[in-house]
Amino acid sequence: MPSNRFQFTLSSLHNSKSGYISLGDENIHHIGDTHEFYKALGYTDDVMKSGLLPEEFIWSEFHKDNCKKSEVCLQVKIIEYLNKHSATFKDKYAEQCKIWLASCLEKWTSNAAECKNCEKPKLIIGFPHPN
């Protein structure tokens, strides 16, 4: 798995990264609509109606032991969100994205447990094929 990953902090009022997607120490995108962001990560209205909070959903989907998806899946979803919502993202972070997209494709083709219910990863329009 690549070492640099996109992270986000939404719930900490005393953190300089709160409300941002960051890569390392750099804030790269302000998340203007948290509902839209959570939706991009798979937090649907049906999940919300079940009573599961967004942070709980993300933990159970992407981080918890024996979760349904992997960190690679989370990174690809963040990349898809950034590609859609940030005008400069693709130009500034294309190399990092290619690394994560290649990791996704590699994981999927190896039939990893987290990928069993995943359709073939969509390569994001505008990013070159990672191979």
Image (cartoon, rainbow, N blue to C red):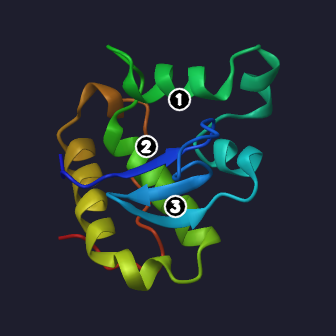
Q: Residue at x 80, y 32 (%)?
A: 45
* Tag 1 residue: 58
Query: Seen in the image, is 62 located left or right of residue 45?
Result: left
Foreground: disc 1 or disc 3: 1
Give the numbered dot on residue 80.
3
Q: Is residue 121 above or below residue 45?
A: below
Task: For marks 2 and 1, give the CA distance.
Answer: 9 Å
Q: Which mark is residue 74?
A: 2
User: Do the residues under discs 1 and 3 have CB atoms within 8 angstroms?
Assistant: no
User: Local crowd at mark 3 within 10 Å, few (<14), some, or many (≥20)?
Assistant: some
Question: Toward which corner of the image does residue 81 lie, by quadrant?
Answer: bottom right
User: Extreme front residue here?
Assistant: 14
Residues at marks 2 and 1 touching, judged by CB atoms closer than 8 Å: yes
Answer with mark 2 or mark 3, whichever residue precedes in sequence: 2
Tell which circle, 1 or 3, labels the residue nearer the N-terminal end. Answer: 1
In this view, the residue in front, 23 or 90, is: 23
Query: Residue drawn at (26%, 75%), measured in percent from left and top?
Result: 95
Q: Is residue 50 visible?
A: yes
